Amino acid sequence: MIDGPARRLDEGALRALVPRVLAGLVRRGEDFDAAEDALQEALLEALRVWPEHSPHDPRAWLTTVATRRLVDARRSEAARQRREEVTHAEPPSGPTEEGDDTLFLLFCCCHPDLAPASQVALTLRAVGGLTTREIADAFYVPEATMAQRISRAKRTLQGQRLDQPGDLAVVLRVLYLVYTAGHAGRVDLAGEAIRLARQLTLATEEPEARGLLALMLLNHARLPARLDSEGRIVTLDRQDRGLWDTREIAEGVRVLQSALALERPGRYQVEAAIAALHDDAASAGETDWPQILAWYDELVALTADPVRQDPAAVLGRAVAVGHVLGAAAGLREADRLREVLGERHRWHAVRGHLHELGGDLPAAATAYADAAHRATDVAERDHLVRQAARARAAQARPDAARGATTARPRP
Amino acid sequence: MPKYLILKHYRGGPEQHHPFPPMDQWAPEDVEAHMAFLRNVGKLLEESGELVDAQALTPERTWVRYGGPEAAPVTTDGPHPETSDLIAGWYMIDVESRERALEIAAYISSEPGPGGGPLHEWLDVREIMWERSQTTDTA
């Protein structure tokens, strides 16, 4: 091969190898903790070396370098403890299915004994192949803190049996957390979550795994329309639908249909169906609210006491009720959540929306201001302050309802 | 270079230059102008190489102290939450001098308020202590 200028490293391809290499190491009897550390070192080495000298067989390269690190680690450990060195025989790695590896590792990383923050961090490193620094950036904590979180998580796993099938529901929850929990403008965790969910659907027939992938795709498709050029939030009813990613919507709908065909509904499939109905409307006015309400009815029917067990579903349903049966009916639904969600910004924001829908602008302005007061996201807080100011101004001067005038009140 | 915190307050501090209502009661175009100004402050400080960090705090506050062995932490919202200082957020900057820190703070305080004129908001400027590596003897 002719040496050209350094080729750009295909990081995606590199990181896709991580779960396969790690699963191979763990399956041949390496300790998960040590193997994961060794692979992380191999990965950093690869990021450094591969742009200049890319290996013929990247997977074998990573396995070899990680194994060398493991042997080195064992050797220094042995020297330190004055124990006899155990030479490591390299057993042939048998052919394994890529999907099996991913599922096996996801069950390790999403072990129920770990706290959610640790499950997320470990999953991103051991399955996603992100570096500790990237994960730290995504969650806006110092790298040392994230390194500590990851090593504590791995210590928790020591001595646990990792050969049992884990809890898929936990894995799905962790992946959804990866999708939603990253800090804006840092590492693309949403894209990473979609990649991991796609891998997961290759490993299991479980319809909820497909439901989750569909939900992510159908929400992610609207990402380009969600903020304007100034970084301001644009609500669904005002988004430029031409900016939506039609390819992602098509894939999401396809994945969702294949999940629904198995006729074992679950919350991710239902939420994906609702997202699909929004994606399907050519304009906000054409949204099929009755059908959305029907899916929300299914969603709240999944729990025995939805107000306490799934208040987010009840709140979403209240919006749908408002659009189908009128603002007053929607507000009555929302009021059932006062005790559970009364201190959360979203409850107040929904009430603001419903009051506005019913034409009660003073009440809408108050509710939006109450929501802004409780918001924990800067962009959302700013958006809610704007909503409050807009509703108040529209009430005072109806012509300004949509910012149609720049006239100032006279002194 | 010294580091400073420029603290913004929800309430507290010296008497306001002029009274103004909460932002959700401003005209929408004044809200836009105010937010655009503050977005630009962050951008300017980043471009000048002086921004370390900028964060906003929610207004919810809980005072907490050790409750004793086997006891839950003791918490309170009082005693005078309506008059006490309540920090809204900060810029952390790394600048040449204290004068530069004050200059930046004064610029932030010129943020447009209701009606479009400067808000003249009081900002609290605090120098951050640091731990030098002991590469020279202490005088």
Image (cartoon, coloured by chain):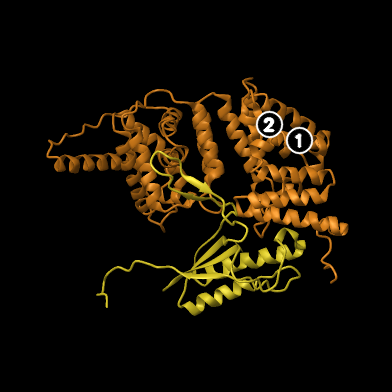
Are the residues flagged by discs 1 and 2 in contact, CB closer than 8 Å? no
The residue indicated by pointer 2 is A273
Chain B painted colour:
yellow
Please, is residue A17 above or below residue A402 in the view?
Answer: above
Residue A240 seen from this side: no
C-alpha distance separating marks 1 and 2: 14 Å
Q: Name the amino acid, label 1.
A: Ala
Residue A382 seen from this side: yes
Q: Looking at the rendering, which quadrant does residue A62 occupy?
A: top left
Chain at tag 1 = A
Whole-percent x, y for residue A307 in the image: 66, 30
Whole-percent x, y for residue A348 in the image: 70, 45
Quarter of the image that includes the C terminus of chain B: bottom left
Disc marking residue A154? none
The residue indicated by pointer 1 is A320
Please, is residue A213 above or below residue A400 in the view?
Answer: above
Q: Name the amino acid, label 2.
A: Ala
Chain A painted colour:
orange
Side of A217 where A74 appears, left or right: left
Please, is residue A2 above or below residue A279 in the view?
Answer: below
